[in-house]
Image (spheres, grey):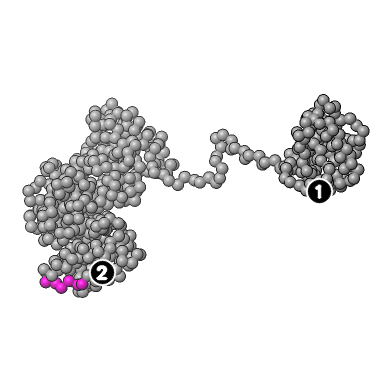
């Protein structure tokens, strides 16, 4: 067998068997006994183990050890230093196992292992052991990571490649600036620049102020293009570009004050609000109302900042675009209607007796002929549904908070109003309305019904009715998703918040009241739209207010001045 080649298991067992037979042979034992006797007679075997062991090993291999002088007496160490194992096999030498074995025949001592043979056997043993697998190769620098590649799916600034061609837009804007003296434009000329950028008309103020026009009163072509090129490269849809213009670079969303320039420009230039030029004191009230309505509808997270995602899910940008084509803001009820603003402001003015633009508990208690229970009013002033500014530390409610209250009170079917009243009734803030909380608010409602000459239903019967109507996922606990899913949240909240509306709903159900009103386009009016329409008609008839401006009149007046229309 070639040296160094590992032995197969069967062959190794055969070699061990032959070695044992050789070691058990009487002639081998006589030779080993004679060699041991000579070593004992010498009295010192220190040099035998180091140098003479090789001679013993070679003699044993040839079976001829008698009559041969192995070492001299001077080279031998003391007999006490001689230590041999009781028995040894070839397998033991190969494996290196020092474990106990049966003792050899009496008088036979075990010879020392030859260093040369030991080294060879250790080398064979090493070759028998399998080598560990090589480590995995590292990926080349700059290469893709191992595993499947997952395509990008989150684009906070819009999907790249979905926007307009940047070079084409820049060239079009340059041509527009070339038509102005010294290639500079002011705010009144930004309408044509906004259209060249592919933006709605009333983006002109955000474009102007974002480029720094407020400092000098005008913009140069180079300054504006530096801004707009950066916006087109980093923002890939209208929502991302709108947030970038109003909040600035690195903004975390739109705060309420970010809408001031846009809405002030709408008040100053929209034909449907031209009559406000004679009443500048109403500008801030109208702008504040519109801002609160924007956040009431769009900011579904209640964070106080509108994100790009919330803006995409809303219709606010579409309503801003409609401002250009609609000369009558009253036909834009979602945010900009002046009639809606007037109804809200008149209601607040009636409650604010000292006209300091804040109201207290007693003032709010007079709303709706005291239809709101005092426990609900206490919860509103506790900060459960308000921003918690300095006014709330003195138990006051600002005009901005009243906007949220009035819209939620008159229309309890919208997502924001459902969450508004859920926060009011969730006393412990655990995200579920328990039977204790329902009974807490119904106790006062029952007293109000008795004061109106109506026998209130027992709480147990009302609770069973409400649970059957809402059908909560967890029995006995009504969550916010349960109320949104059932579609009857208005009936649920009126039973615990507003006694008059609860009675009115009960009477409508018994008498199958009139069908829901609809606007001229055939779309069903919401509870809020119907309330504003009725209230505004009542105010017009009671106070002799002028009816909303006729849009045809504005079209005629604008047609007389062609110069004003040219830049637009």
Q: Residues within 10 Å of mark 2 (few under 14, many from 20)?
A: some
Residue matched to label 2: 463
Q: Is residue 151 left or right of residue 35?
A: left
Q: Earlier in the sequence, mark 1 or mark 2?
A: 1
Question: What segment carries the magenta color?
Answer: 453-458
Q: Nearer the viewer, mark 1 or mark 2?
A: 1
Q: Quadrant of residue 170?
A: top left
Residue 34, image x and y in percent? 88, 38
**Residue placed most toward the observer, 167 or 500:** 500
Question: Which residue corresponds to the image point at 35% horizontal and 31% vertical from the top-left?
Answer: 226
Q: Quarter of the image containing the C terminus?
A: top left
- Number of dots carrying numbers: 2
How far is disc 1 from disc 2 in space, using C-alphas? 88 Å
Q: Is residue 283 magenta?
A: no
Residue matched to label 1: 13
Q: Is residue 522 left or right of residue 544?
A: right
Question: Which residue corresponds to the image point at 20% horizontal and 65% vertical from the top-left?
Answer: 442
Q: Quarter of the image containing the N terminus?
A: top right
**Mark carried by residue 115:** none
Q: Main secondary structure of the magenta part?
A: loop
Residue 318, image x and y in percent? 30, 49
Q: Is residue 230 above or below residue 299?
A: above
Residue 261, image x and y in percent? 23, 39
Helix, strand or loop status at disc 1: helix
> Does residue 15 show up?
no
Q: Residues within 10 Å of mark 1 (few under 14, many from 20)?
A: some
């Amino acid at each position: 067998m070639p040296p160094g080649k590992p032995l197969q298991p069967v062959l190794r067992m055969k070699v061990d068997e032959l070695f044992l037979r050789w070691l058990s042979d009487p002639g081998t034992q006589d030779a080993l006994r004679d060699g041991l006797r000579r070593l004992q007679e010498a009295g010192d075997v220190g040099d035998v183990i180091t140098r003479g062991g090789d001679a013993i090993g070679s003699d044993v291999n040839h079976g001829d050890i008698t009559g041969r002088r192995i070492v001299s007496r001077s080279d031998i160490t003391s007999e006490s230093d001689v230590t041999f194992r009781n028995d040894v096999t070839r397998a033991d030498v190969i494996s290196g196992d020092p474990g106990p074995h049966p003792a050899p025949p009496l008088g036979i001592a075990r010879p020392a292992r030859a260093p040369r043979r030991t080294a060879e056997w250790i080398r064979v043993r090493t070759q028998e052991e399998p080598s560990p697998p090589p480590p995995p190769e590292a990926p080349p620098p700059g290469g893709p990571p191992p595993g499947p590649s997952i395509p990008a799916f989150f684009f906070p600034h819009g999907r790249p490649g979905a926007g307009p061609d940047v070079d084409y837009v820049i060239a079009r804007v340059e041509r527009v600036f070339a038509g102005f003296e010294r290639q500079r434009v002011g705010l009144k000329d930004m309408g044509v620049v906004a259209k060249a950028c592919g933006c709605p008309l009333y983006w002109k103020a955000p474009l102007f102020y974002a480029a720094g026009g407020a400092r000098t009163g005008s913009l140069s072509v180079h300054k504006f293009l530096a801004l707009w090129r950066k916006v087109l490269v980093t923002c890939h849809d209208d929502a991302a570009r709108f947030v970038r213009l109003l909040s600035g670079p690195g903004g975390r969303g739109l705060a309420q004050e970010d809408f001031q320039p846009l809405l002030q420009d709408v008040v100053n230039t929209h034909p449907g609000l031209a009559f406000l030029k004679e009443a500048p004191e109403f500008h801030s009230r109208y702008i504040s109302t519109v801002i609160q309505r924007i956040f009431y509808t769009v900011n579904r997270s209640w964070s106080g900042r509108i994100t790009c995602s919330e803006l995409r899910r809303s219709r606010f940008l579409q309503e801003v675009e409609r401002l250009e084509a609609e000369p009558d803001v009253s036909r834009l009820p979602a945010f900009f209607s002046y009639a809606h603003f007037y109804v809200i402001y008149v209601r607040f003015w009636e409650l604010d007796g000292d006209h300091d633009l804040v109201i207290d508990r007693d003032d709010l208690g007079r709303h709706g002929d005291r239809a709101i229970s005092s426990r609900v009013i206490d919860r509103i002033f506790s900060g459960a549904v308000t921003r918690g500014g300095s006014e709330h530390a003195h138990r006051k409610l600002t005009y901005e908070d009243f906007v949220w209250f009035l819209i939620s009170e008159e229309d309890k079917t919208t997502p924001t109003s459902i969450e508004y009243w859920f926060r009011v009734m969730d006393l412990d803030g655990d995200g579920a309305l328990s039977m204790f909380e329902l009974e807490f608010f119904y106790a006062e409602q029952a007293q109000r019904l008795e004061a109106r000459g109506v026998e209130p239903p027992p709480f147990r019967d009302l609770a069973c009715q409400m649970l059957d109507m809402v059908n909560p996922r967890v029995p006995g606990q009504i969550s916010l998703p349960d109320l949104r899913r059932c579609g009857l949240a208005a009936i649920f909240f009126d039973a615990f918040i507003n006694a008059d509306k609860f009675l009115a709903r009960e009477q409508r159900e018994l008498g199958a009241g009139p069908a829901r009103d609809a606007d001229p386009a055939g779309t069903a009016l919401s509870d809020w739209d119907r309330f504003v329409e009725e209230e505004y008609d009542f105010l017009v008839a009671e106070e002799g207010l002028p009816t909303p401006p006729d849009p045809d009149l504005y079209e005629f007046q604008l047609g007389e001045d062609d110069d004003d229309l040219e830049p637009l």
